[in-house]
Amino acid sequence: MHPHVEQTLFFLSGYGKAVLDGQESAVVAGDAVVVTPGTRHNFINTGKEDWKVYTLYAPPNHIDGRLHKTKADADADTADEDFGQAIGG
């Protein structure tokens, strides 16, 4: 959950589900989802192929140019998470 940051996700390939404040919805390639500040959210790959997602944050919530191949990589990147928290994310 990001209390002060809006997140927009663009799904480029694969499929899965979005969970926004406990409500589940299917998400497929070509979809976009906007997560407003304060919304508890998770996105789960339910397919067998890679789920490619492009994400924008307003204001920025990650170190410029930082890319993560997997969610596990993103979760392990504490410097990137600290950056987001420092700007109010």
Image (spheres, helix red, strand yellow):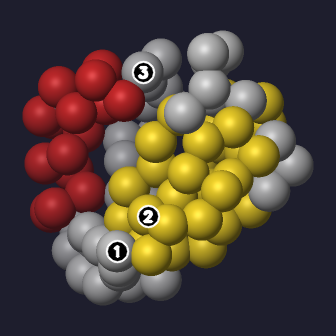
* Above or below 2: residue 62: above
Q: Residue at x 80, y 56 (%)?
A: 31
Q: Secondary structure at mark 1?
A: loop
Q: Residue furthest right?
A: 30
The residue indicated by pointer 1 is 22
Mark 2 and mark 1 residues within 8 Å of each other at the beta carbon:
yes
The disc, 1 or 3, on the residue closer to the chain's N-terminal end is 1
Residue at x 17%, y 25% (from the top left corner): 76
The amino acid beneath tag 1 is: Gly
- At label 3, the amino acid type is Thr
Horizontal relation, residue 81 to residue 33: left or right: left
Checking the image for residue 19, the label placed there is 2
Label 2 Cα neighbours within 10 Å, binned few <14 / some 14-19 / many ≥20: some
Q: Which residue is mark 3?
A: 70
Q: Is residue 61 left or right of residue 83?
A: right
Q: Quadrant of the C terminus?
A: bottom left
**Cα gap from disc 3 to disc 2, whole angstroms:** 18 Å
Rate crowding at label 3 as few (under 14), some (14 to 19) or many (20 or more) other CA atoms within 10 Å.
few
